[in-house]
Image (spheres, rainbow, N blue to C red):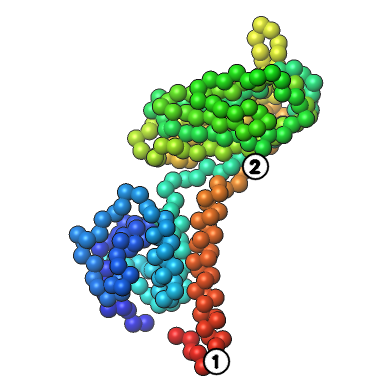
Amino acid sequence: MRQPEGRATVLFGSISDELMRLCQRSWRTRLKTPVPKRSIDKPSIVNYYKALSYLVRMFNSGWGIVRYPRDGGIFLMRPLKYMALAALALLCAATSASAIPIFTVTVNTSSIAGTVGHLDFNFASSFNSPDTTALVSMWTSDGTLSGSPSTFGTTSGVLPANVTMKIIGGAPADYFHDFIYGNSLTFMLMLTYDSAIPGSFTSDNSFGLALYDDSMPFVMPLLTDGSTDFIFSVDMHPDGSYTVHDASSNGQLMVTAAPEPSTWTLFGFGLLAVAFPLYRRRIRSARPGSETK
């Protein structure tokens, strides 16, 4: 297959870097004019809209991105099979860190139904940890919340409505609410990073759910295996990854995870980027007198 006349002379470290750099070039000159190294500056923040617009225009002309095998540069080739690589590039460029999924947490409390106690949402931080947010939503339970909650740190909202907790500058947050246990409780948990990661952070943040009784003089954790007070917890690592812990004593905890919404959005853009040119070419080939190029 004949290669285009012009070929980028800059070496790129990854597909996402290539896309960010390509977005800086003029659409009219991208095929024929070599790109001087000094004219390309990697932006500090990827402009998602520009990246998507670039790909849409590229797909409309039927071109795709592929790495040149001999020297690590890139050139543009005609075959549609390379459009899948361009869709992947969009996903790589728009994703700045590992996304933590949305958790649906269900605890079977039938064995302690009727017990008077307290539930505790604890958002703990460590020295040199990133700023983060925890959103508790979709609370459902046949148990009974009573009185007003005790809160600490940057915490807002009252169950059964949404509760938002933030760790800012290493300061933890806590939500403590009196509760008469029923047969089960369920809520959704979304954890997000407010600081740019990985950055220079070295410590984790941790969100945990603890269920306590109302015994005196000390409240005691319920339904745990004794290793910790928290029947459910998630460690948010400074590199954007996470670890889920199940400390239930007899399988009372069930946790399911769904991708964070922006992940689905980016995946959808990638699919559309691949499907649209195929659909457009099919329409063209169906017209009388048309030829497939």
Q: What's the residue type where badge 1 is placed?
A: Pro
**Type of amino acid at the residue the image marks with label 2:** Thr
Residue 127 vertical placement versus 216 (above, below): below
Q: Is residue 193 left or right of residue 22?
A: right
- Label ID, residue 288: 1
In depth, the one of 9 and 191 nearer the eye is 191
Whole-percent x and y of residue 36? 20, 65
Q: Is residue 85 above or below residue 115?
A: below
Q: Nearer the viewer, residue 247 or 241?
A: 241
What residue did someone put label 2 on? 256
**Would you say the residues marked 1 and 2 are in contact, meaning their CB atoms lie under 8 Å apart?**
no
Is 235 left or right of 32, judged from the image as shown?
right
Residue nearest the viewer, comparing 129 with 164: 164
- Determine crowd level at label 1: few under 14, some 14-19, many 20+ residues with C-alpha closer than 10 A: few
Which of pointers 1 and 2 indicates the residue nearer the eye? 1
Residue 257 is drawn in which quadrant? top right
